[in-house]
Amino acid sequence: MRKILMAATAIFSGGMLASHAQAQMPSVPVTTDSFAGTLSGAAAPAPGTVTVTLRFRDWTDIGYGSDSGTIGKGTNGQPNGSKQQNFQVQNYFRIYPRLSGTAANGLTYGVQAQIRQNSGYNGSTGGSSGSNPNLGNTLYVRNALSYIGLPTIGTLYAGQASMAITQFMVGTQEDFDAGNGGWNGDSPDFISGGTALTWPFPEDGGTYTVNRLVYISPKFSGFDFGFSYEPSYSTGAQGANSFSQAGATTGVAGTSTSSILTSTAGGQQTRKNTFDVAARYTGSFGPVATVLEGGYWGSGVVNNSTGPTIYKGISLVDMGARFNIGALEFGAHYDFGTVNGSGYQPMRSGTHKENAFIGGAEYTIGQGIIGVQYINSITAGTYVAKTPGNGLHEVGVAFGGSYAYAPGAEAYISVLYGQRHQAGADLLNGGTGAFNNNTTARAIGIGNRFDF
């Protein structure tokens, strides 16, 4: 829901783990520190020290939504008697622990994780029993990784780490509403799922929660590069059942979300042997601070062992640019290629290739920021047998602003409008159909983000 890279990697101050760390490592000086930076840009602690941080983030949102699904419609396009609430209130909570160290010889190393509040009702994911409104009363690890590196050689990450393309990504302009992301933020939660725009750019949970190796180089005259390799679509630790007989119906290997298969009867819409390469330039041209990036994302697919394979592996070109002139920032991002934009998986042969553009501008005024974001994309959408090349076309705009009114507290407003269209696809009920091929959505969100 939030800009995933910032949420997973920007760690703020916290000292709650310091005493525990000292008990575990009495011979190593341990400090607590505050720092903000991406996975490839956070400041390292002083040589011979370990820094432990524990950050908390909480969002509280009040929103209004109105869309084509507010009045429920059946597959015949007629009202089905249901109606959704327009006003909503939501709150959610996350924890970000991190340990980072620097050896006397300059070697940097560490681990970090993202822990989320379980948003299911009681018992839905193992939470304790209680009154019906209770949450699941559990926390879960969204992603975890370790890293090791040298300033002159680069850094290697292992685990559920963001791809190089994701770490370098710029131009999506997601910061104007307290970093909530516009169409990649909280406010889309206030409208029906069938009317919310697809976020097709590869920075969401379908990419950063998968096990991989990632290398990021040092900077050379403003340039750096990176690459990653993901053997299989595996999320988290592999249990014994992960290595069950190929094609078995039990165990992780037989599922579409955590597959270590290379082939199976009927095939599977799941990527394998996934890799990406990316490069970035950071510099200035006169008064204009500039970041330019580009990369390629590719994969194989779990093949059909009993007949033709109907899915194509990922083949996506990614590029973006961001420019800053004083308080004004503007940027753009563009992706095109073969990928299922809504799930970051291989797409079915014959469906429409992704062609996705986003751009916008932001202006900072003291402790506040205002901005606008525009998105126009075509993705594979629903497979329609008679016209398989007919893609899902989505257009939307988001605008708003935020204000940091106290340390660790930021209020924001975000306004969204979007349209979706795919001939032959029932966008409200899923699947194909002659009705509900067009949707519109409007939403406004007002909220607070608290960082500790």
Image (cartoon, rainbow, N blue to C red):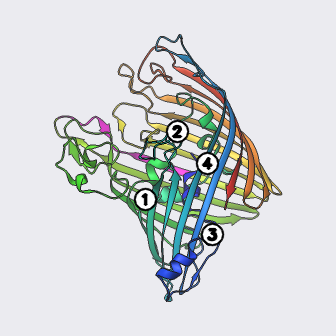
Residue 172: mark in rendering: 4
Q: Mark 2 = which residue?
A: 131
**Lower sequence index among marks 3 and 4:** 3
User: Depth check: 434 or 191 in front?
Assistant: 191
Mark 2: which secondary structure?
A: loop
Mark 4: which secondary structure?
A: loop
Instruction: Name the mark nearer the viewer: 3 or 4.
Output: 3
**Lower sequence index among marks 2 and 1:** 2
Question: Which residue is outermost to the right?
Answer: 366
Q: Where's residue 14, x and y in %?
A: 63, 69
Q: Where's residue 364, x and y in %?
A: 79, 54
Q: Classify 10 Å Cα crowding around label 4: few (below 14), some (14-19), many (20 and above).
A: many
Q: Classify 10 Å Cα crowding around label 2: few (below 14), some (14-19), many (20 and above).
A: few
Q: Mark 3 = which residue?
A: 14
The CA span between labels 1 and 3 is 23 Å
* Badge 1 vs badge 4, beta-carbon distance below 8 Å: no
Residue at the image point whose x is 39% and y is 21% from the top:
387
The CA span between labels 1 and 4 is 22 Å
**Lower sequence index among marks 2 and 4:** 2
**Lower sequence index among marks 1 and 3:** 3
Q: In the image, is residue 384 above or below residue 61?
A: above
* Amino acid of disc 1: Gln
Q: Mark 1 = which residue?
A: 160
Mark 1: which secondary structure?
A: loop
* Badge 3 vs badge 4, beta-carbon distance below 8 Å: no
| Magenta region | 307-319
* Badge 1 vs badge 3, beta-carbon distance below 8 Å: no
